[in-house]
Amino acid sequence: MFTIKLYASGRQKIVEAESFTILRNSCVAPDDGSAEITLHQKNPGDDIRYDINGDPAEMGYAGPERFTKAIIENSAGKTTEIIGLRPIGSPANK
């Protein structure tokens, strides 16, 4: 069991999952930190995807719920992944 903490624009959402898959979006904007996170549940019909790729307040976006950062913890409360957008011009984006 994993706990996923999602953050954006001063809000936080906490969800749980049996397992997860991370697809890093390096072909769209190399090394910007964006990713798709799919949370897998016991019932596959309950799987859900979240995007770590920008401000959810942008108008006209009709895809999965968007966040700017995700922290994934295992059942012992130990952080296993931190996914977040990097500021434009940061050393990782040069």
Image (cartoon, rainbow, N blue to C red):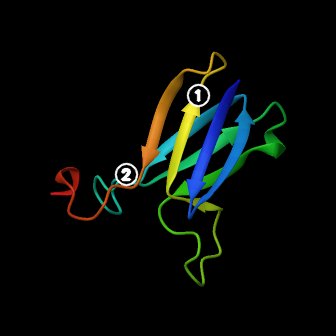
What is the distance, in whole Å, between disc 1 and disc 2 at their CAs? 18 Å
Quadrant in which the N terminus appears:
top right
Secondary structure of residue under mark 2: loop
Residue name at image x 72 percent, y 33 percent: 17
Residue count near mark 1 (Cα–Cα under 10 Å), binned few <14, some 14–19, many ≥20: some
- Give the side of residue 56 with respect to residue 27, left or right: right
**Circle number at residue 73:** 1
Residue count near mark 2 (Cα–Cα under 10 Å), binned few <14, some 14–19, many ≥20: many
Which of the two discs, 1 and 2, sits closer to the camera?
A: 1
Residue 8 position, x and y percent, is: 56, 59
Quadrant in which the C terminus appears:
bottom left
Residue 13 position, x and y percent, is: 69, 50
- Give the side of residue 25 with respect to residue 79, left or right: left
Residue name at image x 59 percent, y 62 percent: 66
Residue type pointed to by label 1:
Glu
- Give the side of residue 31 with respect to residue 5, left or right: left
- Taking 48 as reference, is 58 above or below it? below
The residue at the far top in this view is 76
Residue name at image x 53 percent, y 39 percent: 71
**Circle number at residue 1:** none
Which is more toward the observer, 10 or 89?
10
- Residue that numbered label 2 is attached to: 33
- Taking 54 as reference, is 32 above or below it? above
Residue 62 position, x and y percent, is: 65, 75
Residue 83 position, x and y percent, is: 45, 44
